[in-house]
Image (spheres, helix red, strand yellow):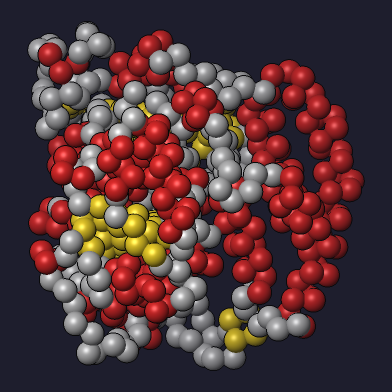
Amino acid sequence: MAPHFRSYFTTTSKQTSYTMSIKSTKIADPANDVSQTKQFRYEASTDIQSVYNQMDVVDKKIPMKNGLLAFLVTLFLGVPIWFAFLLPFTIVASAIHFGYVLISGGKLFSNSKKSGKTTIDSVFDASEDENIEIVPMESRKYDVVLLGATGYTGKLATTYLAKQYGVGSKSTVNWAIAGRSKAKLNQTLESISMELGNVDVKNVDVIITDTSDKTTLKNLVTDTRAVITTAGPFQKYGSPVVEFCVKYGTHYADITGEVDWNKKMMKRYESSALKTGSKLVSFCGHDSVPWDLTVRHLSNKLREDCNDDLEYVECLDEMKGAASGGTLATVYESLDQAVKEFELEFGGNPLDLYERLPDGSESPYKVISDLPSTVSQCRNPSPRFANKWCSPFFMAPINMAIVQRSVALSLARKSITPVKYREAAVAENFMDAFTMWFGLIIISTLIFNPVTRQILKKLLPQPGEGPSEKTRMEGFLCVSGYGIGVKGNKAESVMYFPQDGGYHSTARMLVESGLCLALDGEKHSYSDGGFYSPASIMCDPLVDRLVKTGSKF
């Protein structure tokens, strides 16, 4: 079943009451329902309750539950062990490891004085490649080239491209796959060909490229409108791809969750991207399309229907899924890299790159954190969340950072009142929320500890490994958004993916993001090249693509 993205907005103020909704009494065929108070732009739109009905009753999705036994084990075993042994051990081991890395080649102090205001000159680098000939987009052979097709998520993206857009003479999109090994690429196509029962899949074009060998990267980027990549960890494998996309004016999308790496790429290459027209959009998967689009649409509705600006937003996450080896490898690499590049800076705090405008100046629009640090009852007034509890969601800080980027680049916003962002995972009761929360603390500590991290690297899934098809099909993601405007108006939305958000739906979001960059340029919020978040540049056209390929909004 295709993912569903459906929304329902109710706006109210102290003086007046305004309601905009899509009413549907026929869940099975909402497109034919005529009992609607006001029609959204999409005929298949429906009200929020029918989305929950689809998830709970029709799809029978069951959220992760821990139960009494897991709660008791966590409370009486996990908590004491963490306080008495794991936490002190991690502090000592991390301090020793940190000191060793710094002494053996890390960097600690930065004596270069920095002002509190960052200018475009201090952020951007000048282009080093003035003589490169950029092929016009209309003359390029491919719409998208997928890099990393032999990996776990890459294979899912390849399968989606073949199923959704076809291959060979029947293809509605010109696409190819890329990677280091021709044999492995052909094996991937052979496997997908057998899975889909389509022999033409084996004839999909392959491009041989190695991110560690820059002489091979020109072939990847010069003949395609956009490169989409699943080849992470991106701070390990992604930087040369970004560099060559920028040099040759090729658009770029990835599924990274690595905020620090993305900022490094912005600082290093944005001036060149402005010159070549390359549009680079990271975080085009589970991190962080659902939340980024949710906040932008809540904000847009308040602005369009109530002449109000978003001031507070809460995203409640209901989900079920598992992690892949590639995701875990990214976490390990991020921690190792953070220790190596730790640096104390003096002389002022430079402007966060996510808080500036494309010209390098500071954006007046900010986001402040209201992320929970412990368990709490849900704040959303919907009856669905009555008596339910919330737990911190480990990806929320990343999602908030991307929302910050989109808010900073907002073209419609008027109020400079900061947007307060809150996100949490939903649990049925206090016991499940506590078990989820403290389990996250324990796992995070084990990963952060340099000794136990090495053990986990051997025990947990390896790169290329991931959840089974059964686990992906049983998984799901549902993001319920609740926004309040500066004037007190309110808006609600829900985004539902019937399969796991981390991989199955991520592959789909990446492909559609890449095609949106390649083919929908006239619908983009910005025409210039540069680094953008998903919602800041292609919110509406990306939702259009999600809707046309099966989502409901």
Q: To which quarter of the image does residue 401 belong?
A: bottom left
Question: Of residues 364 and 111, which is closer to you in this image?
Answer: 111
Q: Is residue 472 above or below residue 160?
A: above
Which image quadrant: the C terminus? Answer: top left
Q: Residue at x 43, y 39 (%)?
A: 191
Q: Is residue 217 above or below residue 498?
A: below
Question: Of residues 189 and 228, which is closer to you in this image?
Answer: 189
Q: Residue furthest right?
A: 84
Name the side, left or right, on which 493 lies relative to 308. Answer: right
Which image quadrant: the N terminus? Answer: top left
Where's residue 511, x and y in %?
31, 47
Name the side, left or right, on which 191 lies relative to 462. Answer: left
Where's residue 232, x and y in %?
50, 58
Does residue 518 appear anywhere in the picture?
A: yes
Q: Residue at x 21, y 56 (%)?
A: 143
Does residue 310 appear anywhere in the picture?
A: no
Number of marks in the rendered image: 0
Q: To which quarter of the image does residue 481 belong?
A: top left
Name the side, left or right, on which 120 lies relative to 330. Answer: left
Q: Residue at x 39, y 64 (%)?
A: 208
Q: Residue furthest top?
A: 25
Where's residue 356, x and y in %?
33, 70
Name the side, left or right, on which 25 lies relative to 349. Answer: left
Q: Is residue 23 above or below residue 110?
A: above
Where's residue 429, x and y in %?
61, 21
Q: Residue at x 62, y 22 (%)?
A: 65
